[in-house]
Structure formats: structure tokens, C-alpha cells
Image (cartoon, helix red, strand yellow):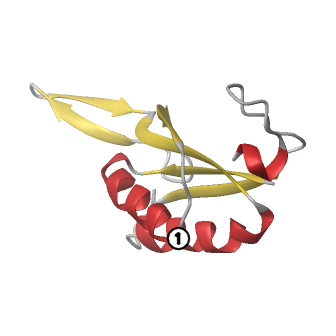
Amino acid sequence: MKLIIAIIKPHMLDAVREALSDVDVRGLTVTEVKGFGRQKGHTELYRGAEYVVDFLPKARVEVAVADDQVDAAVEAISKTAATGKIGDGKIFVTPIEQAIRIRTGESGNEAL
């Protein structure tokens, strides 16, 4: 089992959710986060004064998948979230040692 964490632009969230659904990935967690990478924020003008926006709004999508679904899920996220512009985001894949469904007590891939 693997945990896929994707940091994407917030307006791409619905498209990513649909793309994951199309590759039969069920269940995801979304968190609104702020951060920056290489783009290091930007400068905005408000009422004639310039100010720096250091942390940009992003969406963090977390999906737990079976090992055989990892490539399809990563490809769905990367193709859907890509705009070709700076700030498209990142995808991290980490191993999951154990998963347990609280309601039924199922564990492993059955809990996903």
C-alpha cells in the first residue's frame, strides 16, 4: 500500500478528483494549505501599496492506494493538474505499513 500526497493548485481539485475516480481510486482527503516552492510567492498591489504574498494557496490531496494502483493514480494526478506553468505542484509517494478500517476492523488492502 502507498500514500500519495499531491500539492496542487486549488482550482484543479475537481478535475483531479474526477481523474482519480476514472482510474478507480476511491476515497481521498483534501486539505487547504499554503506554501511556496520555486516560485517563492509574488508581489501584489493593494490600494496603491505593494505587498509580498509569501505563501500561496494550495490544495493537499492524500490518497491511499494498493501497490498496483500507484502508477495509474500518479499519472492521473500529474496529467490533470499540469498547466505547464510554475506552481503546478508536487506529488510524493510514501509506503503505508498498515491500514485498518475502524468500522469493520478490516486491515491491509481490504481497508482501502
At x 44% / y 42%, what residue is drawn?
58
At x 83% / y 46%, what residue is drawn?
108
In the image, taking residue 95 as reference, residue 26 lies left or right, namely left
Residue 66 % position (x, y): 75, 60
At x 9% / y 25%, what residue is drawn?
47
At x 78% / y 52%, what residue is drawn?
109
In the image, taking residue 76 as reference, residue 105 lies left or right, namely right
Residue 105 % position (x, y): 79, 30
67 or 14: which is nearer to us?
Answer: 67
Q: Amino acid at mark 1?
A: Val
> What residue did someone put label 1 on?
23
- Looking at the rendered structure, the secondary structure element under dot 1 is loop
23 or 9: which is nearer to us?
Answer: 23
Image quadrant of residue 86?
bottom left
Residue 111 % position (x, y): 73, 43
Residue 13 % position (x, y): 38, 51
**Is 72 rendered above or below residue 66?**
below
Residue 95 in view: no
